């Protein structure tokens, strides 16, 4: 069964990011959220895992230059 997480837990799962960074990534389309009600937004575990995988893939891509 799919798990849903609120912003504080998502921030923790993504390596102690701030909640505002989670919202920024969501606005930028990097993370997909789901509105349960006008005041409740959640993120699916599968979407969080996909985001983490995309970040790992980008880090391991030899075409991406690192400083």
Image (cartoon, rainbow, N blue to C red):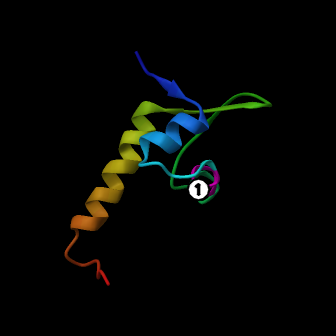
The secondary structure that most of the magenta stretch takes on is helix
Mark 1 residue crowding within 10 angstroms, few (<14) / some (14–19) / many (20+) = few
Quadrant housing residue 56: bottom left
What stretch of residues is rendered in magenta? 20-24
Above/below status of 13 relative to 26: above
Q: Position of residue 10 (x, y in %)?
A: 51, 39
Residue name at image x 29 percent, y 77 percent: 64
User: Which residue is at the far top?
Assistant: 1
User: Which residue is at the far front?
Assistant: 16
Q: Position of residue 38 (x, y in %)?
A: 80, 31
User: Which residue is at the far right?
Assistant: 38
Q: Quadrant of the C terminus?
A: bottom left
Residue name at image x 60 percent, y 38 percent: 7
According to the picture, the residue beneath numbered tag 1 turns out to be 21
Above/below status of 51 relative to 3: below
Residue name at image x 59 percent, y 39 percent: 33
User: In screen coordinates, is 66 left or right of 47?
Assistant: left
User: In screen coordinates, is 37 left or right of 63?
Assistant: right
Q: In which quarter of the image is the N terminus?
A: top left
Quadrant housing residue 54: bottom left
């Amino acid at each position: 069964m799919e798990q849903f997480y609120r912003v504080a837990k998502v921030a923790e799962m993504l390596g102690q990011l701030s909640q505002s960074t989670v919202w920024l990534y969501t606005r930028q389309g990097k993370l997909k959220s789901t509105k349960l009600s006008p005041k409740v937004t959640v993120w699916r575990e599968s979407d969080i895992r996909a985001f983490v995988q995309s970040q790992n893939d980008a880090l391991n891509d030899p075409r991406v230059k690192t400083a």
